[in-house]
Image (cartoon, helix red, strand yellow):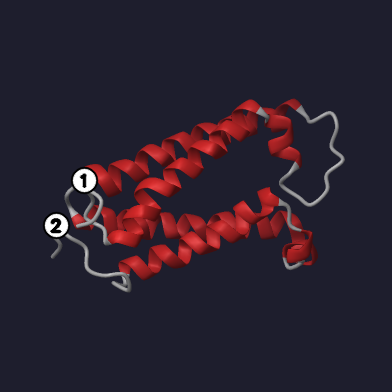
Amino acid sequence: MALGTVLPFWPALLFTYLEPISLLLGWDAAWNSPSAFVTRQLPSTTLTPVPAGALVLSHTTGNIFVLLAALAILCTAITRDARVAKYYLLFVAAGDLGHIYSSYVVMGPKVFWDFSAYNDMMWGNIGVSAFLHVNRLATVLGVFGRFGGQMK
């Protein structure tokens, strides 16, 4: 066990501390700057004014970020059951793929594959999601070491 979790050191650092912090930063962006949050989802958006429905979705997304941060802490730090942490990582890995695919569907292949046009928000949506996805699967597969706690 590392850093008070059932996870090995690197996954514990990433999923118990860094990811919840980044989710709270995402909440802050979605909640306190909803227009910017909406318009920065693509390389250049000239959507002004931002429709009220998009602002509602920004706030809703921010609330989901807070929920995910709490869930990450609950399933990686508070639990002492390695199975809970393992299944949490698998379920969230599936969510990573949905997140990336949603971006692909809206952006289309031309924008999606043009990494040089990405802004910070797009790197977060796609690059960070892909990075987390690979690390989640590697953790479950034991690449970073064994889970502590009970697992049968």
> Compared to 62, does 150 lie above or below?
below
Residue 118 in the image, given as x and y percentages of width and height: 74, 57
At label 1, counting other C-alpha atoms closer than 10 Å, the crowd grade (few under 14, some 14-19, many 20 or more) is: some
Looking at the rendered image, the quarter that the C terminus falls into is bottom left
Name which quarter of the figure residue 58 lies in.
top right
- Which is more N-terminal, label 2 or label 1? 1
Identify residue type, mark 1: Thr
Q: Residue at x 73, y 25 (%)?
A: 52
Q: Return the residue at label 1.
A: 79
Q: Are marks 1 and 2 in contact (CB under 8 Å)?
A: yes
- Residue 57 vs residue 151: left or right? right
Q: Which residue is mark 2?
A: 149
Few, some or many C-alpha atoms within 10 Å of disc 2 (few <14, some 14-19, many ≥20)? Answer: some
Q: Residue 18 versus residue 107: which sits nearer the camera?
A: 18
Residue 15, percent across and down?
A: 38, 52
Across the whole image, how many numbered discs are drawn on residues?
2
Q: How far from the left and from the top, in percent, is residue 102?
A: 63, 55
Asked if residue 37 lies left or right of residue 4, the reply is right
The span from disc 1 to disc 2 (Cα, nearest Å) is: 9 Å
Q: Is residue 51 left or right of residue 138?
A: right
- Left/right placement of residue 126 relative to residue 19 reads right
Numbered disc 1: secondary structure = loop
